Each structure stands twice: as structure tokens, then as C-alpha cells.
Amino acid sequence: MFLPVIIFGNLENNYFIGSFYSIIIKEGTMGSIKGIVEKHGKDKTRLLDIIRDVQSDLGCVSEESVLQIAKEMGLSKVEVDGVVTFYHFFSKTPVGKYSVYLNNSAVAYMMGYSEIQKAFEKEVGCSFGQTTPDGTIGLFTTSCIGMNDQEPAAIINGTVFTSLTAEKVRDIVSGMKSGKDVRDLVKQYGDGLNQSELVKSMVNNNIQKKGQVVFSPYETGSAIKKAASMTPEQVIEEMKISNLRGRGGAGFPTGMKWEFCRKAEGAKHYVVCNADEGEPGTFKDRVILTEIPHMLFEGMAIAGFAVGAKEGILYLRAEYAYLKAYLENVLSDLKKKGVLASFDIKIKLGAGAYICGEESALIESAEGKRGEPRNRPPFPVQYGYLGYPTTVNNVETFCSAVKIVLEGGAWYKKMGTAQSAGTKLLSVSGDCKKPGIYEVEFGTTVKTLLEECEGRTAVAVQVGGPSGSCIGKKDFGRRICYDDLATGGSVIIIGPDRNILDVVHNFMEFFVEESCGWCVPCRAGNVLLLKKLEKIMNGKGTKSDLEEIESWCKIVKAGSRCGLGQTSPNPILTTLQNFREIYDSKINKDLDFITEFDFAAAVKDSCEAAGRKPHAEEH
Amino acid sequence: MSKPVVATASLAGCFGCHMSFLDIDDRILQLIELVEFNKSPVDDIKKFTKMCDIGIIEGGCCNSENVENLREFRKHCKILISLGECAIMGGLPAMRNGIPVRECLEEAYLNGPTVDDNIIPNDDELPMILDKVYPCHEIVKIDYFLPGCPPRADLIWEALVALVTGKELTLPYEAFKFD
């Protein structure tokens, strides 16, 4: 049965093996995979959609399915296998008729993750990482799903369940056991457009503070109309005057990016919207996509006009798949209204990979490949989607661009600080009374924000998600802007009852899980950092361990290929800097070295296998 | 003034680092002017007869004997150096680390295609196999690391001379460039 697995390396050229293979594969399976591949037009850039459909039809993407997809697509087995194994939501083993993905982010832990985990295990009757013997329910964990303001939360077959309690878990599990559609298990819908016919989700927007840019009223279509009365160069000029910078966190000037893209030569140009909001703690894009998607799409069309693109792609993270049908409806509506008269937008779904938030990895993923960052240069503005000049911008950036076209760059520049103009959407979660979205002017201090969200007991604030900075009380006067505390929007508030090292540990586990594995400093370095952190947390650390962890952090930062590894040591580095006393209290000051090596445990298995009695160490 | 004392050992290694050490060629004559050897394959002294200044370890730890040996070195040497990839990272022997040790033993002694005598060696005299291959610094404190597979003779020479004479070590890029 598994023989073809070994000999199928070169199947396109081997008709004998191809036909031999088709004999042993189940008739129905083969037909269904062929149908799925044909439905997607054998399009390689839609490989993720094909794999998703196969998984949804057959319960997993088995070794045989991988081979079949490869055969039908004219790809090698390794190309398909590489994609299947790269993404978190694809699995080669059955994930159950109902697949529960419970979010294990740091804030989920603060809000009662452990209790919910136990409740699921008790009700379902299997542990996390397993599927029930009858194949009905699978329990899995997943990285932040963009619901930090309503944790604990889980995604079951694409449907989001928020603010979970043991009681809710009981109801959900009994519903799954009786075979109900998970969408029917949502009892109460959330606020705003979460209630709309095509969303019907229990997710809440939690918009706590509206500002003058993103969440201020405007008339749909007015901005594209105004842009059309300008030249593309004038639109770009307004962006430059406004000093708008990328809202994903890195802060690259948008006008400059559009200009580079416009000037780059190519048969066509692309506009890509990065809606792969994966930084733990951010959820602002979720709210934009729910409440003002028309503004986002209009912003993409303006970008298209500016850079000379007729096509756009919204790369939507898999966790927000529940919004896809709704967004497609908005698109067709805008088409009818003429807002997108000369600009087409397609939605591409991710499949669970933090690294795809990095723009070149996102492009790779949109092309149907593993989401591994590219070498740069060339940058996406020169060589982007399918090799064409492409501008990749954040959801919030496009929305800001709409207002800049309408009100002018000079109007926009008046808000915020000299280096950081305009407003920023902050996703606030953790130990505060009012978690949710705050649109604030750049330059707002952490202290002001803590007062607004009623998180006054905070002892630490994680600004910018795990890859940002963890600051203590003495720094609460610092300002949120690119030149001080840069952030893509994630603000996690840590109260006095939390163990900060637990939070750091959670973040490092996240980076180990999400490293794409391409370069050694990130792939191996993060594992070593996590192990060293655990040694210190277990009371086995010494002064030399602290020195080592700090120097290793610098190696990982300096040696990694993309932003993931260049920022992943930040949880350790910034807490070493701002909460040194916590580390100092954990280490043994009198000892030079402590080993974690356990001799008896290390020899146990081999002695058992050989049937001999282990003797104690002589030393 | 008495000469500094050096000891060396190859644990879970292939002796390649020691061979590279011998590649210092005629400088070995200068070396014996500079230092005295104690426990080492170089002079075949099997047991420590005194405290040493420098211990050089090739190879990581794959069995109980390696662990005992390494701890002996730590006790008897003021400065301990991990020499080469296996001592520093586990090296080639650590390729088994992804496979449970029971599976390794069963494949090697029970189920492998060329296996004849179906028994996992269990004599009490044999060292006990560890669950995985450990780098030396996870078991004892290591003071210096000399990378390479093997580290170049020049690197070993320069490092030793620097340690013994107290001069600063010059590390040209070529000394640890391996491709």
C-alpha cells in the first residue's frame, strides 16, 4: 500500500507508476480530488485552496491525496507535500469531522485557557493533539486567532467561538456529538455587522474609541471619484505629504512604496492587501474587515490607480475565513456601484502561518507555495506577485489612504507627531476593564491609554506584540509612535497577579512554532533560547546562563534572514532590560554552573531495552 | 617554573579532532617545550596523575563512560575546552537524537537486515547508552569552544599558545570558515 510513496519522486514522467497508482487508490477519492483540481482550473497559485478543499472533503490530506494532487496538478510530490506540511490548518492525519482549534496565546492563558482546555478534554473524551477514536472530534491548539479581546476563544470548522466558559464548552460539545452544523451552535451574535446575514458570528467588535481617520464617517466611492480627478503622481504626492507610514508595524513610507512600484517596469502591476494579522494581540484588521470593508477596498482601488495596477489581492488569514463570503458580497456590491469599475480584487485565504504576515512570504503563499520569505533585493515593488511589481500594504494603511485622498496630505500630517503622522488603531487586551479597539493619535502615552482602557493596575505592558517591547511602570510615560514605541497595534496589559516570565515563555513557544525553518539562527536559535529560559525558570540558572541567553539573543537577531528571527528574542531582551530583578531572583548566585542532565533518566530506556539493571553513577 | 599541564580525550568522536591536532606538524616539538602532557592519547597516560591546567575534549557524550570521563576532566582541569563539532553540538553521533534509543538498539541488534545474533548487548561491563547524545556543555561547565569538523590545526595551535602564553588570540576569518 505504501510502496508508491517511495517510488513516486518523478511521477509526471512515469506513466506506468501513474497508472499503477490509480489502481490502488480508492475510486471515490481519486474522482473527488480530480474534481477539486479541475474546479480550481489546475491553477498552481490556488494550491492552498485545492488542499483546503481536499482536507474538507476527505478529513485530511493523506500521503495518497498528496500524490494524487501532485499527479493532477503536474507538480512533484515534494512541492505539494511541502505546502501541506507548512501550514498549521493542513493535516496529513485525520483532524475529525469537527476540528477544534483552541487559541493558546498569552492572553488566552490570562483569561482562563487552562480551564477551557480541561473542559474540552473532559467533554470530548480525548486530549489536545488527538482525535476521538470514532473520528468525530479533533482537539488542537493554535496561535493567536485575533480574538484577544474576547478570550478564551476557539475556531471550530471555521466558525469562531469567543468568551468560552466551561458551560459553553459543554453545550458546543454536545451539539457536535449530536451532529449539528457548528454554525447553528452560535447562540448569540456579536455587535455591529457581526450580525449581518453573511457573517452571523458571535464575535464582538469592541470599538472603544473612534478617531478622525479610520473610524470616521465618509461616503463610499467619494475618494475614488476624487482620485480619478487627480493624476496618479498627484495621489502619490498626497501620500508623501501626509507622511503616512505602513501600519503593519515596520512603518515604511507608503507614498515612497507606491512610487517605487509605479516606476518599476512590468507587464502589469499588483496591489496586495496584507490581512494576515498574525502578531499575537492584534485584532484591529478583523474589525475593519467587519465594519468598513468598503473603505479598505476603495483604498486598494486608489492604490491601484496610483501604481498602475488593475488587479488586487486581499490575502486573508485563515482565522478570518468566517468573513470571506461577506467580503465577497461587499466586493460584488462595490462592483455594481461602480466603485471598483476598473479594478478587480480577489480574496486569497491563508492556512495558518504567522510568517505569511511578512510581505515576501505572503506573496509566496498567495502564489500557492510555502510561505517562506524571499531574499531581498529585489523587493516586492520590483519583483512581487508572480514576478510583477507589487505593492503590499496593511489593511489600516489602505483605509488611511482613503481619508488622505479626501482631506489632503496636509490635513493628515497635522495629527500625530513629526515622525509619525495620523492615527493608529490599537488592539488592547489583557488585564484591563475595557479591551477592544482604540483609534488614537500617534504620540499618545501608555499611561493615557491605560487610563482610557481602565488597566490602571498594570505592572507591565507589551507594546507591539511578542516582537515588540515589554515595558515596566517607569516607562509608562513613553509614547506610542514609530520613533519611541513602534507597534502594529498590539497592546497587551499585564496585571500584578501575572508571572511575566510565563508570558515571555508563551511568546518564545510561539516563535519556535512559527519559525519557517529556512535559516539556522531562527530555527535553532529560538529553540535554544526557549530551553535556556526554561532552565532559568526551573531554578537551574546561573549568572553565566543569563550572560549566555543575552548574547544568544543578539546572535539570533543579527543572523536571521527576516523580521521573525530579527525580533523573536525581543521578549527576553526587553524583559531582561526592564525586569532584570525577576531574572536575578531566579538564578543561583553562588554557583558557576548547574547541569540539567539527569543521569538516571538518561540511561533508563537503553537499559530497559537491553534488559539490564542500570548502575548508579560513580561520581 | 614548571610547564602548564595539558590533558586530552576523545569521547563520542572519531579522533578526527586529535588527528587535526597532530597536523600542527613540526610545531609539536615547540609544543612539548611549552607544555607537559598528562592523561591523553598523545602520551597514552590512562589516568590523571595530577591537577592539569588545560583539558581538551573531543566528542560529545553518548554513554555513561563518556559522562564519567568528562566529569573526571572537569575535576582535574582548571580550563576545559570543547574541541570540534561533536563536543560542541553532538555532531554526527547526534543524528540519532530524533529516534528513541530503544528503536535504535532494536534496529541495530534485533531487526536490521544484516542482524544474525538477535540480542541487545547487556553485559554489565559495557557502558550504558544515553537516551541521546549530549554536547559537553550541557553536562559540565565548558570554558572555551573551538569550532570545526575538525577544527583546523592552526586554530588549535593558536588557541593553545594563546592560553599558555597569555597572549591575545588572533582569529582570522579563515580559521573558522569551513566551506
Image (cartoon, rainbow, N blue to C red):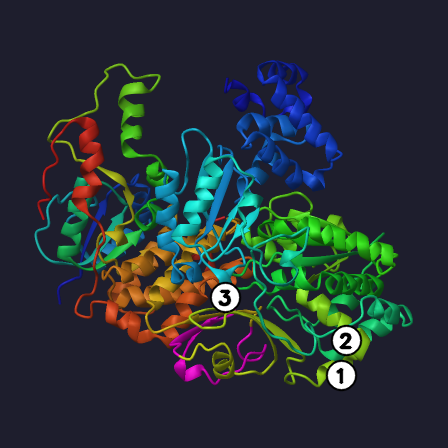
Residue at left 72%, top 83%?
A413
Residue A369 part of the magenta-drawn span:
no
Distance in Å between CA atoms under marks 3 and 1: 30 Å
Q: Position of residue A165 (x, y in %)?
A: 41, 54
Return the residue at label 3. A465
Q: Tag 1's secondary structure?
A: helix
Residue at left 59%, top 35%?
A56
Q: Which mark is residue A411?
A: 1
Amino acid of disc 1: Trp
Mark 3 and mark 2 lie on one chain; the one further toward the N terminus is: 2
How many labels, in total?
3
Q: Nearer the viewer, residue B78 or A214?
A: A214
Amino acid of disc 2: Ile
Distance in Å between CA atoms under marks 1 and 2: 8 Å
Q: Which residues are magenta?
A: A457-486
Q: Tag 2's secondary structure?
A: helix
User: Do the residues under discs 3 and 1 have CB atoms within 8 angstroms?
Assistant: no
Q: Can you say whether A449 is above or below B165 in the image?
A: below
Q: Which mark is residue A466?
A: none
Mark 1 and mark 2 lie on one chain; the one further toward the N terminus is: 2
User: Do the residues under discs 1 and 2 have CB atoms within 8 angstroms?
Assistant: yes
Q: Nearer the viewer, residue B102 or A135?
A: A135
Residue A365 in sight from this viewpoint: yes
